[in-house]
Amino acid sequence: MPADGLPDVSHLSLDDEYHHCEDHSKYLDVRVLIIGGGPAGLSAAVELGQIGVNTLLVDDKSQLGGKLVLQTHRFFGSSEVVYAGTRGIDIAQNLESKVRDLSTAEIWLETTAIGIYEDNTVGLWRRDVDQYILIKPEVLLVACGARELSLPFKGNTLPGIYGAGAFQTLANRDLVKPAQNLFVVGGGNVGLIASYHALQAGINVVGLIEALPECSGYKVHKDKLARFNIPIFTSHTIKEAKGSQHVQSVVIAQVDEAFKPIPGTEKEIACDCILIAVGLDPVDEFYHKALETGLTVFSAGDALEISEASAAMFSGKIKGIEIAHHLGYQVSDVSDKWRGIETVMKSKPGPIHQLEKTERSGEVFPVIHCHQEIPCDPCVTVCPNNLIKMNGDDIRSLPRFCPIDEKNCIGCERCVAVCPGLAITLVDFRKDPLNPIVSIPFEFSKTFINVGDMVPVTGENGHILGRYHVISTRVLRHYPRTLLVRVQVPKKIAVKAAGIQIVAGWKPSVPAINQFIEKTQHEIIICRCEHVTAGEIRALIRSGVRDINQIKAVTKATMGACGGKTCLSLIKQIFKEEGIPLLEVTDPFKRPVFVEIPLQTLANNQQENP
């Protein structure tokens, strides 16, 4: 007998129930479904649309562009194929307009991909109308980007600790100032760029740490921080965030070659915000689930391989061609040239070269302060007389100024304004052979500098060369976000001048800690959703547990709202710390529903049969 209030289903067999579901399976057919409207997804949609492939592009945000909409800096890469020299937010608008102009592309914003099922359907939740829809694509392209990695340290759940994406969303998109004094953990491009964005937002950056002996991001990004006298601690790690109700200080320590904190090297620095930028993980659950169910699937951008946004754009272009070819459209295979460009865009920073700068007089010329091999060529393409050339055919080689007899620099300053790394200045001896005028790029508000001011001029690495008068300022029409500040300096330092320091470095008022403070492992939170500590997980591992599903059953770790997207990598790190090879560790089961959704929304699916 059924319980009170419940229907009697005893007369139904399993077969009856199965056929009932089969008869009422509802889905929408699409040719290509793209999950993710960031640089890779948008670029793929453009290629597919130009070929004539009907495409549905979905993104869970209220606007397209992914992380591009948070990037106020100009991009590196190739001017010809990935908008190098253009700000990320402008690239997002450009790509979006191209997709919206396509008659073959449909866009659903505020739409979250929920899961992929055995009948090769993809569940989508359109949050703006609270509607759940099943899509059956011929081809799926996963371009979901990446999620940020976290770190286990004491106090890591205090308010005031952000990932780089959250911080940039507040500062760059929402124009909210989330901190007064920021400390940054991570010296890759994400941490270096976020630090610079904080300075632009009027936030004091009190320090940055990197566990490696050198920052892994581009040198030009590090140099921009050095020119503002930001303390950069390499071979350091974070040990603790201190505070009662909010972050009030951070404890850092030097690490040895095995990245273990060295007792006695602790420093405590006052801050009200800590930004964590220690790497990214591909958001590739949908890709692997599609492979498991037999759905034809491709991936692009960070969902395929973590790299720069310029590489993600080109990755999307290539996947668009590959998908069209797979569907039988008469398109050429991706050329070796395109493959080569993709490889270049994904390349890591190359070696740093020490180049001698010689004094010159009686003319005007650019000084290139870029010494690291990175994929970037805007300065080459923008010169009207083609006087800046790469030292070779590879755009990763160093640019150099190459005057010729019939042509010389005209002092247009375009190379100064376009350089994403702010690594070009212009020296002009034409008016005064002994005290030339140097044009320096400046990406802060005009209110910081006025004609007649005496400003501290720095070299490449932030050392102050002296204080000199601002002669004039200028903004080029095509580069309105960069102020060109002209200062008059002595001839002997003209080629060394690289930046202007208007924000003084901050000296920590909290004294360094003299004694070693041991971490309390049991207090470090690993799973924030379910408040599971490192001590609980470590105890289970030491008791012999090798299956994360068992850890999940005992502690509920990975069962929170994020579905293990943050804590799973930290749990695996604890296994490695305990000397357990990950080959011996069983991963938790991945359920088809990857994000939380109200059951009522699922139950209210009202799709008609196709």
Image (spheres, rainbow, N blue to C red):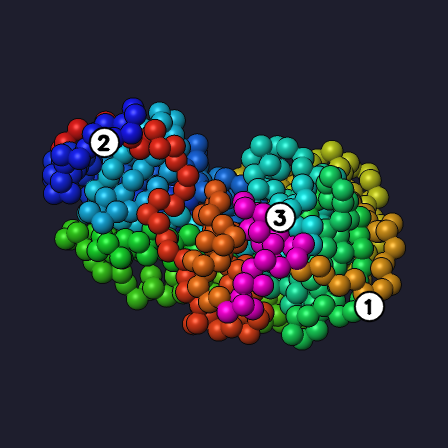
Residue 178 — which label? none
Give the mark, 1 or 2, whose residue is nearer the N terminus.
2
Name which residue lies at 80% across and 48% down. Answer: 270
> Which is in the foreground here, disc 3 or disc 2?
2
Task: Look at mark 1 in the image and give the residue it sits on.
Answer: 264
Residue nearest the observer in this picture, 270 or 171:
270
Work out whether 206 lies above or below 54: below
Three-letter amino acid code at disc 3? Ala
Dot 1: element: loop
Query: What SS does tag 2 mark?
Result: loop
Per the image, the residue denoted by label 3 is 194
Residue 120 screen position, x and y as percent = 22, 48
Q: What separation in Å lies between label 1 and label 2 (alpha carbons)?
A: 71 Å
Across and down, in percent, residue 191 comes to 62, 53
Q: Which residue position holds label 2?
A: 1
* Rendered-image quadrant of the N terminus: top left
Instruction: Identify the element where label 3 is drawn.
Output: helix
Left/right of residue 119 with respect to residue 109 in the rendered view: left
Q: Which residues are magenta?
A: 522-544
Q: Is residue 157 left or right of residue 488?
A: left
* Label 3 – label 1 distance at C-alpha: 30 Å
For discs 3 and 1, the disc positioned in front in the rendered view: 1
Residue 532 belongs to the span the image colors magenta:
yes
- Position in image of residue 33 (x %, y %): 27, 43
